[in-house]
């Protein structure tokens, strides 16, 4: 086997980073799953409104902590040390909440926000740098990364949620801390990639690389914005169709349908992206067209659905899963490919800013779109379609430009 063939393979570092992010995400999503229930329970006896306000502030604070953690990782202590320190801080946060008091709650949430800010962007940057000498595998690599996150989130919510709800909140939070500590072991044994000369990876001019980074951030913002736009109506449709699903399957299966489709789609995409190296722009274009097709299919379901509409909904869910897998992990692949590795964590951390802002803006209109589901679906369908067409024109323009230069 020659050196070229050897270098275009997922290596042991890939597995190490995937194991780390798996345990960290299982810990984080499991922690989140029982947090509100703990706050409104017998220990703290908060009102639901207060608990949800704290929860919203908690999740929103990650936006700033990721930027701070990325700056430390890229500019001061290095990505590996930053992610390792972040994991340990998160574990302390999960353990600290086991002390039953409001003060412990706030200290715990602060530590988890701070720790995740150091861990998340730096671990993602470490993972991406692992592929800088084998950029053909970037797409499949980040799809593996996305797969690991979704499997971990599903299992973490189920496992820690069961422990917290049926045994003890403290046991649930303690298990979250144990899983977080497990994730740091993999970071500790990992080998950080050496700095790579970008001129040997991508010969594109700096202006073109910057343009692709900006376009990628805009695309991921638009995707999650449209996703948020229709989310309340899709959730309403799920509840309406649940009764038909329970006629031939357990009710709890319904909550696992989306993760099952997403995980299955991810596995298929990993195989395809590993064997067939299509352009990232083409994957993104397909992602938006599949998204438009998904919302188009959902538009055919009447306001009062029947049992026959269940199949249509499942088809639309599969199409939306394909859309997400063609867009979400590929964006990080593009950022890794065109960003200077020295500042990769910083660029990754800033991608969450416009996404969060767009979600907040759309949140102001949730009541309107909830009461007008057909308008929400139509807006999502049109938006996805327009973006897909714009990307198609972009691809044709780039191809024509390349032909002219050659």
Image: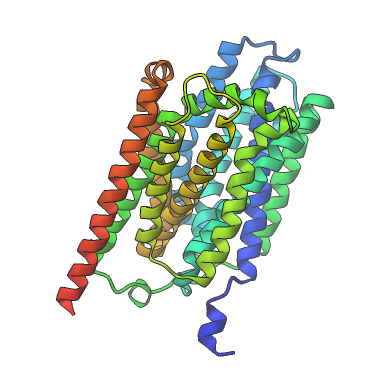
Residue nearer the viewer, 248 or 160:
248
- Quadrant of the snapshot with the N terminus: bottom right
Within the image, what quadrant is residue 352 found in? top left
Residue nearer the viewer, 311 or 388:
311
Q: Residue at coordinates 32% horizontally, 55% vertically from top-left?
A: 213
Residue nearer the viewer, 7 or 370:
370
Q: Residue furthest front?
A: 308
Q: Residue furthest bottom?
A: 2
Q: Measured along the vertical axis of the image, is residue 243 above or below residue 253?
A: above
Residue 53: x and y in percent read 53, 18
Q: Is residue 230 left or right of residue 154?
A: left
Q: Residue at coordinates 43% horizontally, 35% vertically from top-left?
A: 227
Q: Residue at coordinates 28% horizontally, 43% vertically from top-left?
A: 386
Residue 319: x and y in percent read 49, 45
Within the image, what quadrant is residue 157 found in? top right
Q: Is residue 278 left or right of residue 91?
A: left
Q: Residue furthest left?
A: 404
Q: Residue furthest right?
A: 167
Q: Measured along the vertical axis of the image, is residue 256 above or below residue 56?
A: below
How many numbered marks does the figure carry? 0
């Amino acid at each position: 086997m020659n050196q070229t063939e050897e270098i275009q393979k997922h290596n042991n570092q890939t597995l190490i980073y995937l194991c780390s992010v798996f345990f960290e995400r299982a810990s984080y999503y499991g922690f989140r799953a029982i947090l509100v229930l703990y706050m409104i329970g017998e220990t703290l006896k908060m009102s639901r409104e207060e608990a949800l306000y704290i929860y919203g502030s908690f999740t929103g604070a990650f936006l700033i902590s990721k930027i701070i953690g990325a700056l430390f990782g890229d500019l001061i202590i290095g990505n590996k040390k930053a992610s390792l320190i972040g994991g340990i801080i998160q574990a302390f946060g999960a353990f600290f909440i086991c002390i039953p008091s409001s003060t412990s709650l706030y200290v715990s949430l602060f530590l988890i926000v701070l720790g995740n800010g150091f861990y998340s962007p730096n671990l993602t940057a470490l993972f991406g740098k692992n592929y800088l000498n084998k950029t053909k595998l970037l797409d499949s690599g980040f799809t593996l990364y996305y797969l690991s996150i979704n499997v971990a989130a599903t299992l973490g919510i189920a496992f820690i949620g069961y422990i917290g709800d049926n045994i003890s909140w403290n046991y649930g939070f303690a298990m979250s801390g144990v899983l977080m500590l497990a994730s740091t072991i993999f970071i500790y044994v990992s080998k950080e990639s050496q700095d790579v000369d970008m001129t040997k990876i991508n010969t594109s001019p700096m202006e073109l690389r910057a343009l692709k980074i900006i376009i990628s951030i805009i695309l991921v913002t638009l995707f999650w914005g449209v996703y948020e736009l229709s989310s309340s109506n899709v959730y309403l449709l799920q509840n309406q169709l649940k009764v038909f699903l329970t006629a031939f399957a357990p009710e709890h299966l319904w909550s696992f349908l989306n993760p099952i489709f997403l995980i299955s789609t991810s596995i298929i995409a990993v195989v395809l992206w590993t064997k067939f190296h299509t352009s990232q722009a083409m994957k993104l274009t397909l992602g938006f067209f599949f998204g438009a097709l998904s919302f188009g299919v959902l538009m055919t379901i009447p306001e009062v659905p029947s049992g026959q509409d269940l199949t249509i909904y499942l088809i639309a869910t599969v199409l939306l899963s394909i859309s997400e897998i063609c867009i979400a992990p590929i964006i990080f692949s593009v950022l890794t490919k065109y960003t200077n590795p020295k500042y990769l964590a910083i660029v990754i951390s800033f991608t969450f800013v416009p996404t969060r802002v767009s979600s907040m803006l759309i949140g102001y209109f949730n009541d309107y779109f909830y009461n007008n589901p057909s308008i929400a679906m139509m807006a999502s369908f049109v938006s996805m379609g327009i973006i897909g067409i714009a990307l198609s024109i972009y691809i044709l323009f780039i191809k024509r430009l390349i032909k002219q230069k050659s």
